[in-house]
Amino acid sequence: MEALLEISDLRAEFTTRGGTIVPVDNVSLAIGVGETLALVGESGCGKSVTALSILRLLPRIGRITGGGIRLLGVDGDLTTLPEQQMRHVRGGAIGMIFQEPATCLNPLLTVGEQVAEPLRIHRGLGHRAALHEAIATLASVGLPGEDHQASRYPHELSGGMRQRAMIAVALACHPRLLIADEPTTALDVTIQAQILELLRERRRDLGMGMLFITHNFALVADLAQRMAVMYAGRIVEHGPVAEMFARPRHPYTSGLLACMPRLGRAHRMRENNEMLPTIAGTVPRLDALPAGCGFAPRCALATAACRSETPPLVQISADHVVRCPRWDTA
Amino acid sequence: MTGQVVSVLATWRAHPLGQAAGRFAGMPLAMAGLFVLLAVVLMVVFYRLVLGVDPNAIDLTSLNAPPDAVHWLGTDGVGRDVLARVLEGGRISLTVACSAVGVSMLIGFLIGAVAALGGALANVAAMRVVDLAMTLPPVVLLLVLASVAGQGIAPTILVISLLSWPVLARMVRARLLELREREFVIASRGMGGGVWHLMIRHALPNCVDILIVYATLQFAQAILAEAGLSFLGMGIPPPAASWGNMLNGARSSVVLEHYPWQWLSPGIALLLTELAINFVGDGLSTALNPRSEAG
């Protein structure tokens, strides 16, 4: 498959008062044309920072210090592209949906104006033409024009409608890649299902690739072909979704999967008075990472070697890698 | 057509500014101020059509005449009609104040926005300039600038506007520093918006409340500054009328004692306008602040 996005050995650093932390450490990922890659992990694992690095939108304390990002159709590396060209990539070739629909829309502009903005920036449309196009885009995500949705302000819309508007902003210029950073976390399940259906439909119609960031495994199974699991800034396992669900190789992946409630199991657990398993401990703070494998303190399989040096990624099949020396016992 | 009007009205009512206008309409003092201000502006702009007296015409038959049927507010020491001069003075004072506020708003907003949205270097540079401008003693600076720039309307505007922008620049910067980290601004950058785009589409609408309140309060300041400069002989030179130089011309003890209409008239005009503007400004700052009690 032709690679749409190729991230190789990406490293991002944040300079804080306590010193330098590395929220993204040596991350390599690839997304094919029309493919969906899910990026999962607990909060604070570096998923969002990875996504923001692709668009070079890191907060001021952060910068990319290594690696490269290539996008199909763009000459040069996204990490070093001049700002002027980078602006054409943002919103043009890559669309991004943010987590909080409530705060990602400017409260002082109508929804129509906000969807029109990328059209004006990237396609050079005039005010009227852009607004016209924006109304069509809004209609295509389920905010129809006949009841004047385009002339409403964000505070007049419900959470689900705002997320649709946000998706319309991201999709307005038909991007080749869509980055969706937990797009449904703030929504209730029925709206969530509608939004996912919408994304799937647009993916099919536009043939766009998708980087889907989530910590909800149900969505991963539903939407993605491959998934990458991040822990403490590093990729710990990366492979086809079906394979990883059936046989997770990294203890962190299997831990996460075990935490997921399942219908059949719930009944049995209630009868046996069992608790839903959790992974003991919490994600380490990035300014106090343990030596060696970041997961070792929480890992039942950890050996002395795990605690002293970072295990390398092991290729266990054609497109399945895992960062654990004991992957065959997990 | 009707449907269009209705939908435009609905949009306006939903807009935060439309809601603020609604709150403003509910404040009697502010509304009274607005009416007085409107009346002053109308009189000052259109008085020539009604009054038919030239503010610089000299009537040698009535020097220092008290108010009567011909000269409603009397005449001054060289026989000029005081009412016409008060209105003409208001015209110049308001023009100067308006332009000075406009210029200082432009400078203040641009410098504040560049400081907040530009790089770290722009921030430091801009804020040091602001610090410098703020540490200079205003009255002394005003006098020095005025003596360098000379007299007349344009230099007066320049002097007043150069003095007043730093406060606004700081307020704008503070607001935009907060705005810069808001998600919708990051989202806007994520769809390709540049610095200029951020300034016009996000920074400006989100600073409108600061700008409006600043403009009204600064407007009052500018009228006073103009009056002060002209009173000191550094602003609008005679024979052109301004409230300041009218007060200046009437400051001898003879005039103070025997011809009170010559200084009461511009004084009261100044006072009324100032009060009206301040009430409007107070009302606006309450109406535009969604966290305030009156909201």
Image (tube, rainbow, N blue to C red):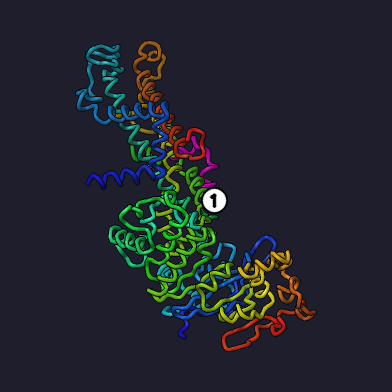
Asked if residue B207 lies in the magenta stretch, the reply is no
Q: Nearer the viewer, residue B10 or B56?
A: B10
**Number of numbered discs on residues:** 1
Find the residue positioned furthest to the right: A304
Which image quarter: residue B192?
Answer: bottom left
Residue depicted at x 59% and y 63%: A61
Asked if residue B134 lies in the magenta stretch, the reply is yes
Q: Residue A309, image x and y in percent?
A: 74, 79
Apparent side of residue A219 relative to residue A20 in the rendered image (left or right)? left
Mark 1, residues whose alpha carbon is within 10 Å: few (<14), some, or many (≥20)?
few
Q: Nearer the viewer, residue B290 or B283?
A: B290
Task: Decide if residue B273 is in sight here.
Answer: no
Task: Decide if residue B195 is in sight here.
Answer: yes
Chain of the residue where label 1 is placed in the rendered structure: B
* Residue A144 in the image: above or below residue B25: below
The secondary structure type at the circle numbered 1 is: helix
Work out which quarter of the rendered image holds the C terminus of chain A and state it: bottom right
Q: Nearer the viewer, residue A286 or B109?
A: A286
* Residue A201 in the image: above or below residue A242: above
**Which segment did they paint magenta?**
B130-147
Find the residue positioned furthest to the front: A271
Which image quarter: residue B50?
Answer: top left
Residue depicted at x 40% and y 17%: B252
Q: Residue A51, image x and y in percent?
A: 53, 69
Residue depicted at x 46% and y 43%: B165
Q: Residue B32, image x and y in percent?
A: 38, 26
* Residue A80 in the image: above or below residue B22: below
Q: Which of B115 and B286 is in front in this view?
A: B286
Which residue bears the numbered disc 1? Answer: B128
Q: Residue B247, image x and y in percent?
A: 38, 23
